[in-house]
Image: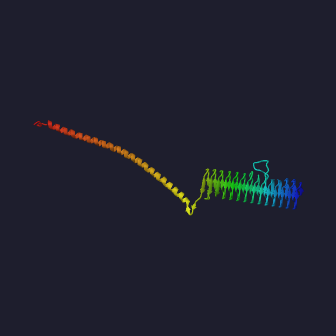
Amino acid sequence: MLSSTWGVVAGGYANKIQYAPAGGIAGGESNVIYYGYAATILGGEDNSAYSAAYSTITGGLSNSVSGTHHTVNGGYSNTISGDVRSQSGTLSNSGTVSGGVSNLASGLQSTILGGTANNAIGTKFSTVGGGYMNTAKSSYSTVVGGYRNKAFSNFATVAGGFLNKANAKFAAIPGGSKNTVSGRYGIGMGVSSVAKGDNSMVLGLSGDKCSSSSANTLTVCGDSFTVNGNEVLDLFRRRRDLEESTDVLEKSVDVVSKHGAELEKEVEAQSVQLEAMLKQLREYKELQAKHKLLKANVEAIRTLVQPGSAA
């Protein structure tokens, strides 16, 4: 069916162009163009272009496009929406879905190369390379592939893996599983790493949650770290053991110092007592000498006063 100025339906079955000047359908079945100047559907089945000026669907099944200058190269149930996130009244343009199944692109110049159930829905230049159920939700955000990965902030990137989330500007997750980056310019990789601080990097290798909330830090969680067969963590364990031994030694020194101070006080007290005793002894000797002299004087006097002493 053709109801459009300069429109062309070259072949196929049940194809339709309405109110789409210069629109064209080359072939296929049940393809539709509505209100899309120079919109084109080359083939496939049940594809539709609504208000999609200068947009193209090359083929596939049940793909749809709205907005301007978009391209869907094929696949099944892929959609380029005319909506632009955070910009009401603005039509999306120049988006691309190269193939895959049930992918959704919106915004300005968003791109999905393939995969299944992926979303590139940032305001502009969001990209999903492929994989399954990945989402690039902000401007210049990118998810290369993997499963259920999310880039939710401007310039955030997830290269791949499973259940990774880049939630801050310029955050990056090269891969791994269940990693989260919430700090700007942060990097998370491995397993269950959480980078909350700006300019921080967390590498989770232990299988347990590995988290850092501080900025400008490198955090590594693991059970072993070898270089040329040498266990590097042993150095840290030895240092820790040495620090613990030092702490014990310092406590022992403190105890000895305390006992030494107490002993010094006791010696000082005993010295005072000894000095007092020596003083008493000297005074006793002086008293003894005086007593001896007095006794000698008494004996002399007694001799003088005895009868016959004059003769």
Question: Do we see residue 238 in this rendering?
Answer: yes
**302 up-or-down from 143: above or below:** above
Disc tally is 0
**Foreground residue among 94 and 184:** 94
Question: Do we see residue 224 in this rendering?
Answer: no
Query: As drawn, which residue projects farthest toward the bottom?
Result: 229
Which image quarter: residue 3?
Answer: bottom right
User: In this image, 267 relative to 135: left or right?
Assistant: left
Q: Which quadrant is home to the N terminus?
A: bottom right
Residue at the (17%, 38%) spot, across then down: 300
Q: Position of residue 204 (x, y in %)?
A: 62, 57
User: In this image, 216 relative to 130: left or right?
Assistant: left
Residue at the (41%, 47%) spot, across then down: 262
Q: Position of residue 232 (x, y in %)?
A: 55, 59
**280 up-or-down from 9: above or below:** above
Q: Position of residue 284 (x, y in %)?
A: 27, 41
Q: Which quadrant is home to the C terminus?
A: top left
Residue at the (33%, 44%) spot, across then down: 274
